[in-house]
Amino acid sequence: MLVAERRDGYRIEVRTDAGVFNQAALVLTFEGQSWRGTTAYCDRVRNAVDAFQYLPPLRPGPALILPGAGPDTSRIATRRAPPWTIRTQLTAPDGSNVDAEMQGSQGPYVDWLDETIDAIKACGPPTS
């Protein structure tokens, strides 16, 4: 599972079933309301999950010792959004896992989360 919470109260959960690949349910909660969309029944959620699969991999820092480290001003992000906290499990190429909590207000993962709010809402009305 992946759980992301934005400082202003939005919460997104990405839920999967064991052994079922490329399928997910996304649940959005905000101010006592809840929206739910699945890859099986909502094209916008299917598109969001497809986009998630192509997000760039994250590399643990410190950034100055990562492969290819060096001055590169072309990669400086300028957009600042309300910060998100993401809790999930990271998987290494050898299949080992580690629990992780990340925080950020810019970059492709923040952009994906912000866009996914509208995708989930487009799947149907909220419940209280």
Image (tube, helix red, strand yellow):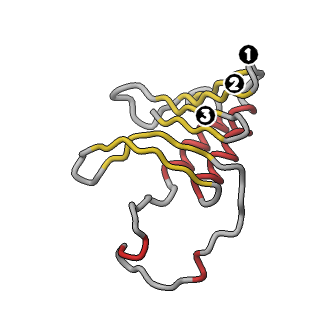
Q: Residue at x 70, y 34 (%)?
A: 9
Q: Which of marks 3 and 2 precedes in the sequence?
A: 3
- Figure check: 55 above or below 3: below
Q: Secondary structure at mark 3?
A: strand
Residue 84 vs residue 17: left or right?
Answer: right
User: Which residue is label 2 attached to?
Assistant: 35
Mark sitting earlier along the chain (2/1): 2
Q: Split into 4 quadrants, where in the image is the C terminus?
A: top right
Residue 69's place in the image compared with 111, above or below, is below
- What kind of residue is marked 1? Thr
Badge 2 vs badge 3, beta-carbon distance below 8 Å:
no
Question: Is disc 1 surrounded by few (<14), some (14 to 19) or many (20+) residues within 10 Å?
Answer: few
Look at the picture and state if 108 lies above or below 99.
below
User: How far from the left and from the top, in percent, is residue 2?
Assistant: 49, 36
For numbered disc 1, what is the local secondary structure?
loop
The quadrant of the picture occupied by the N terminus is top left
Q: Label 1 near label 2: C-beta < 8 Å? A: yes
Residue at coordinates 50% horizontally, 49% vertically from top-left? 102
Q: Is 101 on the left-hand or right-hand side of 103?
A: left
> Which residue is nearer to you in this view: 23 or 76?
76
The circle on residue 44 is: none
Residue where numbered disc 3 is placed: 12
Where residue 44 appears, as percent x and y from the top left, is 67, 38
Instruction: Tell me which numbered mark, 3 or 1, is placed earlier along the sequence.
Output: 3
